[in-house]
Image (cartoon, helix red, strand yellow):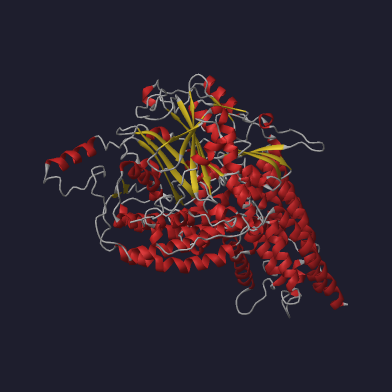
Amino acid sequence: MPSQSEDESLALNGADRSPLQPALQARFEEGALQAQPTVDGIETLWVERDQLRALLQHLQQSQGFEMLFDLTAIDERLREHRDGQPPADFTVVYQLLSVSRNRDIRIKVALLQPALSLPSICDIWPNANWYECEVWDLFGIRFDGHPHLRRILLPPTWEGHPLRKDHYARATEVEPFSLNDARQDTEQEALRFRPEDWGMQRQSEDSDFMFLNLGPNHPSVHGVFRVALQLDGEEIVQAVPDIGYHHRGAEKMGERQAWHSYVPYTDRIDYLGGVMNNLPYVLAVEQLAGIEVPPRAQVIRVMMAELFRIASHLVFYGTFAQDVGQMSPVFYMFADREKLFGIVEAITGGRMHPAWFRIGGVAQDLPRGWDRMIREFIDYLPGRLAEYDTMVLGNGTLKRRTQGIGVYNTAEGLAWGASGPGLRATGLDWDLRKKRPYSSYDQFDFEVVTASHGDCYDRCLVRVGEMRQSLRIIRQCLDNMPEGPYKAQHPLTTPPPKDRTLADIETLIQHFVNSSWGPVIPPGEAMVTIEATKGLNAYYLVSDGSTQSYRTRIRTPSFAQLQMIPLLSRGLFVSDLIAIIASIDFVMADVDR
Amino acid sequence: MAELGVIGLRVLSLLGLLVVSAALLTWLERRLLGLWQDRYGPNRVGPFGVLQVVADMLKLLGKHEFVPPFADRPVFVLAPAIVLVTVLLSFVIIPFTPAFPLVDMNVGLLFFLAMTSLAVFGILLGGYASNNKYALLGALRSAAQTLSYEVFMGLSLLGVVLQAGSFSLGRIVEAQQELWFCVPQFLGMLLFFVAGIAQSHRLPFDLPEAEHELTAGFHTEYSGMKFGMFFLAEYLGVILVSALMTTLFFGGWLGPVLPGWLWFVLKTTAFVFLFVLMRAALPRPRYDQLMCFGWKCLLPLALLNLTVTGWVLL
């Protein structure tokens, strides 16, 4: 259904796909860059380790790649299908995004044991800091010149690097865990906050600083999240976010679950986003498998995703007001969300985690009467939103608390990897649904909501505007729902359409195999990014031609945005930090995975 | 001797009445918030959930009396008692009916101001003795807030005193026979109400215990009945400020047809409702904004009110 592009250099979704390699080749030595074809069509270049920094610097400064979109690694040691790729034990992958040119590039570096180290790029993109820590933590690859390379998701006492293929994936593969007193003491001691480790002074010339441990259990940190604060009175000198308390190894689970049975796990990444999480995953698998999704399924997906965008934004709106001390709005908004969940339940059978999208379509067709329920809801919500405008956005105290607080501009946002409503609040109209329409978003009429100040208040303003736009999209789904199958007629659709299984033996076998072992997805690499509730959410899947993914990388918006907290809160008060945390709109599951 | 017995009876009945109404107020507040927030609130224990307060009290009494090992024990235990006792003492001057102020002091208002100043010690000591950073920040906020708002609370009341020509609350009510002071002292009334909310640490002036910033502020480390005493004191504070609003600006027991005490109760209840409504409706300003508001806006207004009142009377 996405319109066929006539220009070869453009991908189906409108992103610029003309190869950069010829231009780069001229600048770098012969053979320094080697291209790798991938299923997703994103230009992928292998580079030598000593050329890496020069290449990345060139891409950022001269080629307009403002954002380090993702930085991750692959343990290649057990991978069989590596045709045309240089030999490697580990590959580090740099995924860059150019907003100005609407294009991506993927840079890969091959590493051979035992030389598992690379130069750090924290000075090129500030957000590389956490990503490099994560790669060190999960793969054991060092980054020379990193200011503070440490375990970021796992406890500091962890042994081994869990995303390596030789690390166990289930607790049952090792001795049962036990925590004796001695071990508990070591673990606790390891968590002690030492200001010196973070380059903090204990005193200034005229005062002693107070170190306040905000979280991991605190009413306003939205989950298990800890910020270590260096305070002068109530003024924040430095804030150090500490994450990892919600880490469940979602990426590792991707390597042991069948392609199909991983769908429910995606639901729990951004747990307020429901089926919105399924979307980038199934889109990436479908790209690997070459499945074309029928129009009805695409529109159903858009409709459900937008319903969940409203649900997520309602939670944001309520908790935002609550965190600046307004008690009531959250109750009204949760009541609205409850109505919405009623619809979700009627359609999918689930509420927060329906796991309802399938490889090749959706789980079931829409039930009878779905249109009446949705119409009632989209007629009901605008009135409520208007009331909330007066109650929350129009409130003078709330404005004084949030305007001009936690400001970042477009350039800072891009350099730190911010996306979604936060980035749009700085005035940049970067919405993937418009810039690179996926799942038939190009057929819908809606506007990209932006604001201009990039402060806490504007981030809220953008989300409120987005709820109205989502209602617009849902109304269009309602009025123009295409007829047809809700699942693709494709051998890899899981579970496969059943109508012909008892008619011929081929489809019966296919059905049996796909339902028991799960589908075998052809080898390849694909990354699909979508505009999720909180920003850009991407699944980067590596298939080695088996029933499971070889590597599942989940790039989440919250991870990047949380890293900005020190930048946003310096010199402000503790109460401002609370407003900033509320305005970022993260969930810890989305950060830690 | 008999006289002493009568006084004792009056003290005990007042004490009983106050504790019961403060306890009922916790239930009332939760039901009202429920009503305004499209939910039920406690409705399971007893008719309309009114026995919820009994259940809550039993729970608090059944809690382990815990004092954190790092706290300063004697001060930690004493602090909630100071807060509760000062609030309770303030009630002795309230004239519920012409015959029932416990003590008709001719410096009644000054006594009230003195007691509220003392109450802040309880909070400050509690926060300090807890030896907890959140509690300390809460206590510091509380001290700064109370000191700032006390200044113009006193000033806002002086208009009333000038008009009535007395600090005695009984005399002030009698001076309102012709016209309630809420009319000539409209500005003074507003100022006193704002200061009263600040003194009782209620939203939007609940910064000392701002849940979203300081977990529970000065009483973070408190549990069981020691927490219960802080809690009770907060609700008594609400009743106290409402009762004073009634007495100072809305003619106390004065009113047609109904008996005086009923008028008093009705008026006071109306203000209690207003307190709850404000909690449901308003967000919380930032600490420095609160201070600025107090010193730069309310204090000049209070002085203006006093000057104009003095000028008119002269």
Residue in view at x 73 percent, y 33 percent: A201
Quarter of the image containing the N terminus of chain B?
bottom right
Residue in view at x 80 percent, y 73 percent: B164
Q: Could you say where residue A367 lies in the image, as x and y percent from the top left?
A: 26, 58
Q: Which residue is the extreme one toward the left?
A: A503
Horizontally, residue A329 falls left or right of residue B163, namely left
Out of A363 and A578, give the one closest to the viewer. A363
Horizontally, residue A382 falls left or right of residue A462, namely left
Quarter occupied by residue A415: top right
Horizontally, residue A151 falls left or right of residue A284, namely right
Q: Which residue is the extreme one toward the right?
A: B314
Quarter of the image containing the C terminus of chain B?
bottom right
Out of A22 and B97, give the one closest to the viewer. A22
How many tags in the picture? 0
For residue B46, say whether it is visible. no
For residue A144, say whether it is visible. yes
Out of B144 and A464, give the one closest to the viewer. A464
Out of A477 and B206, give the one closest to the viewer. A477
Q: Could you say where residue A3 lies in the image, as x and y percent from the top left?
A: 36, 57
Q: Could you say where residue B83 lies in the image, as x and y percent from the top left?
A: 69, 49
Answer above or below: position of A68 versus A440.
Answer: above
Answer above or below: position of A20 versus B46.
Answer: above
Q: Could you say where residue A243 lies in the image, as x and y percent from the top left?
A: 55, 37
